Image (cartoon, grey):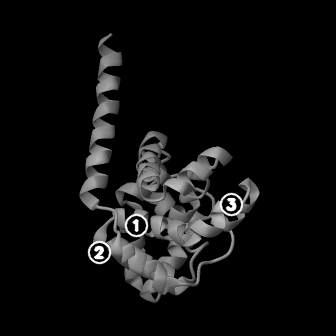
Amino acid sequence: MVRLLLQFRPDLRFVEDSMVRLALLMQGATGGNDETVVNFMNMVHAGIFLDFFCMRWSYMHMRFDFFEKIVHERLPLVFEHFSLLNITTDMYLRPWLLTGFSKVLPLRSALRVWDGFVLLGEAHLFSVAIGLLTLMEHRLMTQTFAGCIDILTGKKIHDSKKLFKLVHDRPVSCSRLAAWLATQILAEEKQTLYDLLV
């Protein structure tokens, strides 16, 4: 599937093992039938993944900035701790998103995240990421830089019941994400236009 995608979309870049993981996740979700290829192609062309795989850095950072804002609001102690340790969002959120959370969640839970993504859009992915940080909060607060990175990228979270309750109880709003991205993109385009005119 990945070779087929890259053949038709040479502008997409291969980002780590992300496309392979996403393809395997899709294959597991659909049973590996013909629909798997179509679903994979459609998913890769969703806004967030297209920006990642085309390496549109400014659009990726807009999403990271949005996520940081949500972390600052909902988990201020974690936000401060990460700031003191110089842990940036892209150190853990990028791998979570690009691997379909399969590095930190068991397959069954990762597939449930993808169901939510298909039904609710990319804001659901941010809801899951906030839920994961909430579950990890107490452990993260007692760790150094290396300890935090190990927790964020290491062991899988097996308390899926608690995670999905957190996601359900405090979802990230799709409209808020859309408004944030629209504002950021408009500001970037205004700056580009201004630079052209000056």
Residue sticking out furthest to the top: 198
Q: Earlier in the sequence, mark 3 or mark 2?
A: 2
Q: State the quadrant of the C terminus.
A: top left
Residue to which mark 2 is pinned: 119
The residue lying furthest to the bottom in this view is 31
Q: CA distance from mark 1 to mark 2?
A: 13 Å
Determine whether 85 is above or below 103 in the image. Answer: above
Tags 3 and 2 in contact by the CB under 8 Å rule?
no
Nearer-the-camera pick, 29 or 153: 153
> Which residue, given by chain and number where applicable, does mark 1 sit on?
127
Of 172 and 10, the residue lying toward us: 172
Q: CA distance from mark 1 to mark 3?
A: 20 Å
In the rendered image of this protein, does residue 162 appear above or below residue 93?
A: below
Residue 31 in percent (x, y) is at 46, 89
Measuring 32% from the left and 66% from the top, which residue is drawn there?
121
Q: Is residue 94 left or right of residue 84?
A: left
Give the SS element for disc 3: helix
Q: Residue at x 56, y 57 (%)?
A: 78
Residue 96 visible at all: yes
Q: Which mark is residue 148?
A: 3
**Mark 1 residue type:** Ser
Q: How many marks?
A: 3
Q: Position of residue 175 (x, y in %)?
A: 24, 57
Q: Earlier in the sequence, mark 1 or mark 3?
A: 1
Q: Position of residue 85 (x, y in %)?
A: 67, 48
Which numbered disc, 1 or 3, marks the residue closer to the eye?
A: 3
Measure how far apart labels 3 and 2 are at the Cα level: 32 Å
Q: Residues within 10 Å of mark 3 (few under 14, many from 20)?
A: many
Q: Residues within 10 Å of mark 1 (few under 14, many from 20)?
A: many
